[in-house]
Image: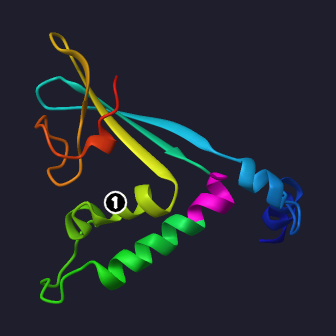
Amino acid sequence: IKPTRWLVEKFVPQPGEGPSPEAQKAGFYDLRFVGRTEDGKTIITKVTGDRDPGYGSTGKMLGEAGMCLAFDIPADQPGGFWTPASLLDGKLMDRLTSKAGLTQVNYTVGARQGVRPVCQADHGFSFQKCSHPFRHPPP
């Protein structure tokens, strides 16, 4: 479809028009994801990265995901279809926070308790206390 291709090429960056290496190193991101539990509590997850999200951070995340798939899954893991969270069981998040410059903090908001951090490491979005202090900064 030539007319569509011609139109798209007018608006997308051309090869070599991306950010400079300096801009990629200086880039960062700071995102919030908001969800609601079945009992009406709100979960807010803050995710930050230390590099440009399109160039610096994506490559590191893909590399660590590959390393996790290659080295962190038990050989006797049964086959089938898995989501990353159920298959990698927190190991990918550990790799991303220790080696790829990402941080993740989860907070719950409830009517009585205000805002408090919770951990997602090995027990999903639960309200348990755990032993992962790096995911529990002061609110």
Asked whether residue 118 appears in the rendered view, the answer is: yes
**The image quarter in which residue 39 lies:** top left
Q: Residue at x 77, y 71 (%)?
A: 1
Establish if 56 lies above or below 38. Answer: below
As drawn, the residue found furthest toward the bottom would be 75
Q: Amino acid at mark 1?
A: Asp
Q: Is residue 2 above or below residue 136?
A: below
Q: Is residue 17 left or right of residue 127?
A: right
Q: Is residue 51 left or right of residue 23?
A: left
The residue lying furthest to the top in this view is 112
Which quarter of the rendering shows the C terminus? top left
**In this orientation, does residue 19 appear?**
no
- Please tell me which residue is depicted at 50% across the width and 65% down the height of the picture: 61
Residue bearing mark 1: 94
**Residue 75: x %, y % from top left:** 18, 89
Q: How is the image coloured?
A: rainbow
Relative placement, left or right, of 38 versus 61 is left
Q: Which residues are magenta?
A: 51-58
- How far across and how far down the image is residue 115, in percent? 27, 19
Give x and y (percent) for residue 7: 85, 58
**Res. 106 image quadrant:** top left
Magenta span main SS: helix
* Vertical side of 5 occupied by 42: above or below: above
Q: Which element type, helix, strand or loop, lies under badge 1?
A: helix
